[in-house]
Amino acid sequence: MTKIAFIGLGIMGSPMSVHLARAGHEVRGFNRTPDKVQPLVDAGGRAATSIADAVEGADVVALMLPDSPDVREVLAGEAGVFAHARPGALIIDFSSIRPDVTVELAEQAKQAQLRLLDAPVSGGQAGARAAELSIMVGGAEKDFAEAKPLLDVVGKTVVHVGPTGSGQTVKAANQLMVAGHIELLAEAIVFLEAYGVDTAAALTVLAGGLAGSKVLEQKRENMLTRSFDPGFRIALHHKDMGIVSDAAREAGVIIPVGALVAQLMASAKALGDGDLDHSALLKGVERLSGRS
Ligand code: NAP
């Protein structure tokens, strides 16, 4: 049994913390908006009143927060983890943030006698609920080995991909691919509908061929029924397109299709769709064709 502090109990963090509690670990959860801690409490966890309360005596501190500034604030802020965690504790950051910020925070963690793994995830809300996430982990090999039994509780494909920041780099590539897949699926759906094809039947046959994908499996229903409750918010995917665009530029790598999809994601946010699921890229395709 491991004493775990879990900070950030949103769409992803909540089911992940619940799985850890159900697996028999002692989980203390903290969320800025307190009522989101209830599912964890129902699963046998405890509601913490502050970050300090959550991390007191914890062996592992898990984070699942939206963006780099949030992780920086929760870790390095005055009332944050670095100031209150016990020396030697292992921080597992499941959030998707900038790789360079991860490297900087891992260095600060070291100075506070703490260790940090970047462990962003893929698989969406469905993957978090089913404990079937893909987890791409950056950091020291021995820290990964220590974290692996916990990561296996929430994930199905758990891979150490290199030193600190590598997990975030792999996640950036993941987000580039997912955004492109969703945009092309959306374009195919609008195209099929324009011809009056039975779109559900069409997607069934496409799913069985080379065009089949997890994106198609997981997002087809949302798109066919125009149900865009998140899931994964456009605002977060916009953040991730910024991360991959900056990182590619830094490395001198040209990603023309990625750049276009990043613009379309930005447009969706600018037009007020930021809190919808990323499958709502479909709305943008419809707008472009005068079909909204
Ligand atoms: P979410 O539902 O918005 O949850 C984020 C949580 O962080 C909320 O509980 C929020 O608290 C808390 N929070 C936000 N800013 C904070 C701050 N400055 N200080 C303390 N707490 C703060 O987001 P999510 O969908 O779970 O995503 C979390 C991370 O996972 C993101 O990096 C995202 O890119 C990544 N991710 C998401 C998915 C997905 O399908 N959703 C899939 C893979 C990866 P409040 O309740 O008070 O707002």
Image: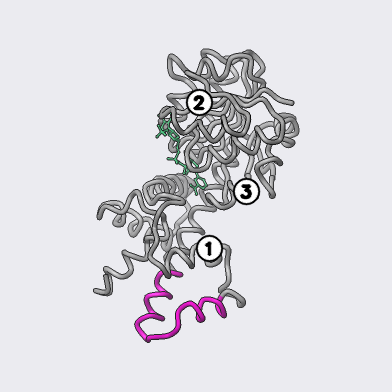
**Rounded to the nearest whole Å, what is the CA distance between mark 1 and mark 3?**
14 Å
Q: Residue 109's image quarter?
A: top right
- Decide: few, some or many residues near mark 2? Use Cα within 10 Å; few <14, some 14-19, many ≥20: many
Residue 41 coordinates in the image, percent (x, y) = 56, 29
* Quadrant of the drawing holding the N terminus: top right
Quick check: which quadrant has ligand 1? top left
Residue 38 coordinates in the image, percent (x, y) = 51, 32
Q: Amino acid at mark 1?
A: Val
Residue drawn at x 30%, y 70% as measured from the top left: 286
**Rounded to the nearest whole Å, what is the CA distance between mark 1 and mark 2?**
31 Å
Residue 65 coordinates in the image, percent (x, y) = 47, 35
Mark 2 residue element? strand
Sequence-first tag of 3 and 2: 2
Mark 1 residue element? helix
Give the side of residue 138 with respect to residue 146, left or right.
left
Residue drawn at x 57%, y 41% as measured from the top left: 15
Name the residue beneath numbered marker 2.
30
Q: Amino acid at mark 2?
A: Phe
Q: Residue 239's image quarter?
A: top left
Decide if ligand 1 comes within 8 Å of the CB at mark 3. Answer: yes
* Residue 205 lies in the magenta stretch: yes
Q: Which of label 3 and label 2 is nearer to you? A: 2
Name the residue beneath numbered marker 3.
133
Residue drawn at x 60%, y 36% as measured from the top left: 18
Query: Tag on residue 215?
Result: 1
Q: Which residues are magenta?
A: 185-206
Q: Which of label 1 and label 2 is nearer to you? A: 2
Closest to the observer, 261 or 256: 261
Picture colour scheme:
one colour
* Quadrant of the drawing holding the C terminus: bottom left
